[in-house]
């Protein structure tokens, strides 16, 4: 079992930045591919970004490419999502997820463990 806890959400203005953190407890963090997903009101959960076990491979949704950066610190059991140039359409609950396989995927059902989510609201 892996327990995930997100933090760092908040209310910001368009153009601002936020950094989300997700800290894991339980099994060996470095054995898990980590992903970030988001869900806006009335919409399905969508992929944002993912990072492989060692952190040297990342993947992004087209909507955030060039603005968001995912990283991980295996010594701290933490994955980060640096979000720059935020837009109102980035408003959503952001979820951290873990997958006990080496390959990062964009499919929510591929991830076995999920955090409770953190709200990000971007005002125009």
Image (cartoon, rainbow, N blue to C red):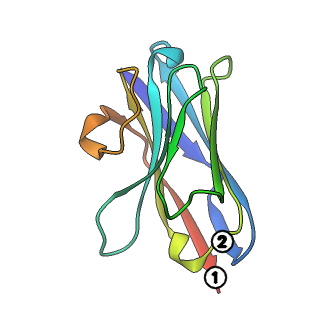
Residue 89, relative to residue 98: is it above or below?
Answer: below
Mark 1 surroundings: few (<14), some (14-19) or many (≥20) residues within 10 A: some
Residue 101, quarter of picture: top left
CB contact under 8 Å: marks 1 and 2 = yes
48 left or right of 110 in image: right
Q: Is residue 66 above or below residue 57?
A: below
Residue 58: image x %, image y %? 54, 37
Outermost residue toward the left in this view: 109
- The image quarter containing residue 14 is bottom right
Q: Which residue is mark 2?
A: 11
Identify the residue shown where x is 63% and y is 20%: 74
Rendered image: mark on residue 77 = none
| Nearer the observer, 12 or 116 | 12
Q: Residue tagged by mark 1?
A: 123
Q: Up-down: is 10 above or below 30?
A: below
Q: Percent position (x, y) of residue 80?
A: 63, 40
At which x and y percent is residue 21? 63, 42
């Amino acid at each position: 079992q892996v327990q995930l806890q997100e933090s760092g959400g908040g209310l910001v203005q368009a153009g601002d930045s936020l950094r989300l953190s997700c800290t894991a407890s339980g099994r060996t963090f470095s054995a898990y591919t980590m992903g970030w997903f988001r869900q806006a009101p009335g919409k399905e959960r969508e992929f944002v970004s993912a990072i492989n076990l060692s952190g040297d491979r990342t993947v992004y949704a087209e909507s955030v490419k060039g603005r968001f950066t995912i990283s991980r610190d295996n010594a701290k059991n933490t994955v980060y999502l640096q979000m720059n140039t935020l837009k109102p359409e980035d408003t959503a609950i952001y979820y951290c997820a873990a997958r006990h396989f080496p390959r990062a995927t964009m499919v929510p059902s591929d991830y076995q463990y999920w955090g409770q989510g953190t709200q990000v609201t971007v005002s125009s």
